[in-house]
Image (cartoon, helix red, strand yellow):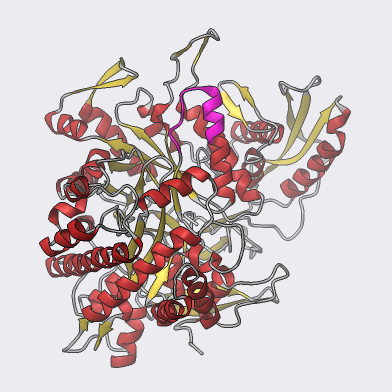
Amino acid sequence: MTRFAAPIAEQIWDMKYRFKQADGAPVDLSVEDTWRRIARDLAKVEAEPAKWEETFYEALSDFKYLPAGRIVAGAGTARQVTLFNCFVMGTIPDSMGGIFDMLKEAALTMQQGGGIGYDFSTIRPRGASVSGVAADASGPLSFMDVWDAMCRTIMSAGSRRGAMMATMRCDHPDVEQFITAKSEAARLRMFNLSVLVTDAFMEAVKADGPWDLKFDGKVYHTVQARDLWNKIMRSTYDYAEPGVIFIDRINQANNLSYCETIAATNPCGEQPLPPYGACLLGSINLARLVTDPFGEAAALDEAELSKLVATAVRMMDNVVDASKFPLPQQLAEAQAKRRIGLGVTGLADALLMLGLRYGSDEAAAQTEDWLHAIARASYLASVELAKEKGAFPLFDVEGYLASGTMRAMDEDVRDAIREHGIRNALLTSIAPTGTISLYAGNVSSGIEPVFAYAYTRKVLQKDGSRTEEEVVDYAVKLYRDKFGEAELPDYFVNAQTLAPLEHVKMQAAAQKWIDSSISKTINCPEDISFEDFKDVYMAAWDSGCKGCTTYRPNDVTGSVLSVSEPEKTATPEVVALNGEDPQMPHGDVIYMADPLDRPQALEGNTYKLKWPDSEHAIYLTINDIVINGRRRPFEIFINSKNMEHFAWTVALTRMISAVFRRGGDVSFVVEELKAVFDPRGGAWMQGKYIPSILAAIGGVIEKHLIAIGFLEGEGMGLKSDPQAEVVNMNGRRGKACPSCGQYEMRMVEGCMTCASCGHSKCG
C-alpha cells in the first residue's frame, strides 16, 4: 500500500478526493482504490478497457500524473457532477430576458461544480437608453451583482463551489467603474475580474494617445490611454484586481483562430475559451521524474516523460466522452474541438533537484526545453489518437497549421498532423494545482516557485484540541534525506525572495509552448513602488505573456504570512488586548468569556425598510453599548405589521442580538445576510440590486455599524475592536480560511489558498 509522503497529503485525499458513501463511510479504502476507480472509469470508452485500465493505473500511481481535482473526486462515482474544471458561458445578450437566461445557465453549471467565465462587455453601459421602456440602462456592473448573489446561493446550498471570472473590454464605457469595483471589499467577492486589453490599447498607452470608450459604434467618452492604464495599475496595486488579459494576443495564438473568437477565460485565467467552451485539466508531476535528485547525474527522465504524456493525453481525451455536462451547448462544443489542458506541477522542485535557481536564465531555458518536450509529445500522442479514433470534427488542416502554437512547432510534427489530422484542438495549459500538489506530497505548485520550504500547520483533532505538524516541501525533504540538516544551498529561493521580473521571466519561458494560458501569481513586495509595479505588467506584455496577475500584500486583500527558515515556524499569533486569552472556535471571530450584561438604558437608532413587494414596512431598532469610549452594537429588534414575517423576524432578532452580546468582530452578520439570495427574485433599491429582504436587512445593519464607527465603510471590515483583535506575524490583521479558520491564506496561482487545509477560492 502506498505511503503518503506527508500527513497533509493523506488528509487532503481523505477530505477532498476519497470516494465515500452518503453517511461518510469510505468506499476508497486506500489511495490505490482511488487510482483504480479513475483508471477503470476512463478506460470504459476504450475498445480494450482492461488493457487501458492498467496503463492508466500505472500513470496515476506514485502521483506521476495528476488529473485535476474534479476528475479525481468525481470519476467512477456515478455522481451527477462534471469532470471539467473550466467553462466560459454563452455570449450575454443585451436584453433583460437574455441576461436572465444566462444567469440560469450559470447556476446550472455551478451546481455541478464548474467554474465559469463571462464577458460582460456585451451589456450596454449605465445610462444608455433602453428603447420601448422609457428608462436608462443600469449597466453591466449591476448585473454582475446579481451573478455574485446567485453564486453565493449555490455555495450555501451545499454544492461544490464554482468560482467566476468577469471580463470587460478596455474600450467599454463602464470599464473605469469595472476597474474600481473591488475597492468595495464586500462587492463581487465571488468574481475574479480581468480587463481585456487589446494591442491597439497597448500601442496607445506607449504613445500616450487618446482612447475612445464606445459601445455599439457610439463613442461615450474619450480618455488618455495612459491614464486608463494607470487606473488599472493603481487598482491592482491597491486591491490585487483587476488582472490583465492580452486578448488580441490570445486570439492570434489560438490554434482555432480560424473557427472561434475568444472574449473570456475561466476563473483562474489558464483557459481562454469561446462561448460555451469547456476544458478539463491535468498535470505531469515533474518532481517525480527526476533521476538522481541533487546528484551529479541529476536529470529529468525524458523517455518516461514522453510515455507519461502520451498516456495522460489519452486519458484526458476519454474524459470528453465520460464526463457529464451541465448544458447541451457545452457538450457540443467540447466534442467538436476536444480541447484538453495538460500542464505540469512540481516544476520548481524539479529545478532545485538539478541545482538550478528558479528565476535564473538557466532555469528559464530548462523550463522552456521541458515544456517544448511536453508539447511535442502531446501533439504526437494526439496524432496517434486521430489515426485510431479520428480527428476532432472541426479540424481544418490549412487553418490549423497556420494558427497558434503550430506555427513554431517542429516540422515533423506538422507533417504528421498534415497527413493524419489531430484528435485534440488544443492540448496544453498550466492550471492552479495547489490542492493536488499537497495531495502529491507537497510538491511545488504548477510553475510557481516554492512558497515556503517548511511551515507549521495546526490540525484540529476530534476532541477540539489542536496539534502541530511540520509541512515540508517535497524537494527540501529529499535534500534533508540525502544531506541531513545541512544548510540549504543558495539556489533554494522562494516566492518572497524572488524579484518580480524573475517571475515574469519564468512565465514568459513557459508560455512559448503552452497552447492556452498559464495561471501564475507574480508576488510583489509590499513596499514596491508604483512605477516598479507598472513595469512588471509592461514586462509581461513585452515578453509575450498572454496575461498578468500580481499579488501585493495590502490592507484590503490581507497580508500573506511571512515564511521562515525550515527550522522555524510560521504560526500566526492571537493577541488579546485586555489581558485575557481569547477563545477562537473558528474563523476570525473572537469571543469573550461571558456575554455582555445589558445596562438599564441604551442609545440606538430605528430604521424604516420598505421592501417593494411587501404591504407593510419593516422597522429595525439597533441599540449600542459603549465600551472603553467606543460604541458597538448590543441588540436588535425587527418588527412589522405583516404577520407573514413574524416568526422569522423574532428568530432573527434573538439570534443577532445573541451574537452582538458575545463581542468581537460581528461584521460577519452583515456579510451572511447580504449573501442571501431569494429564488423568487430580489429588488432594485437606490440603484443597486438587492437579492432578498434579508440582504436588505443586512444592508441596514451595515449602514448603522458604519455610522457608529464600528466598520470602516461598506464591506471594509472592523475598526479596532475594544475587546480583542487578531494580528499575524507581521503585526497586521490577517484573513482566516473560510473552511478551517486557520490564518494560513496565501495567494498562489491567482487563488487565495489555505496552506493548512488546501481550501482554494478556485475550488
Above or below, 490 against 316 in this view is below
Residue 291 visible in rendering? yes
**Residue farthest to the right, as pictured:** 643
Above or below, 375 against 266 in this view is below
Rendered image quadrant of residue 298 = bottom left
Instruction: Tell me what residue is drawn at x 14 percent, y 52 percent.
Output: 407
Determine whether, in the image, residue 606 is placed left or right of residue 416: right
Determine whether, in the image, residue 91 is placed left or right of residue 102: left
Observer-nearest residue: 53 or 722?
53
Above or below, 363 against 7 in this view is above
- The number of discs equals 0
Residue 745 visible in rendering? no
Q: Position of residue 335 (x, y in %)?
A: 41, 52
Observer-nearest residue: 53 or 269?
53
Q: Position of residue 46 (x, y in %)?
A: 44, 70
Rendered image quadrant of residue 280 = bottom left
Determine whether, in the image, residue 624 is placed left or right of residue 207: right
Observer-nearest residue: 517 or 702?
517
Determine whether, in the image, residue 128 is placed left or right of residue 448: right
Asked if the magenta segment contains residue 100, the reply would be: yes
Q: Position of residue 530 (x, y in %)?
A: 25, 42
Above or below, 107 against 353 in this view is above
Q: Which range is magenta?
A: 90-102
Observer-nearest residue: 618 or 344?
344
Asked if the magenta segment contains residue 485, the reply would be: no
Q: Position of residue 74 (x, y in %)?
A: 55, 65
Instruction: Tell me what residue is drawn at x 16 percent, y 29 percent.
Output: 204
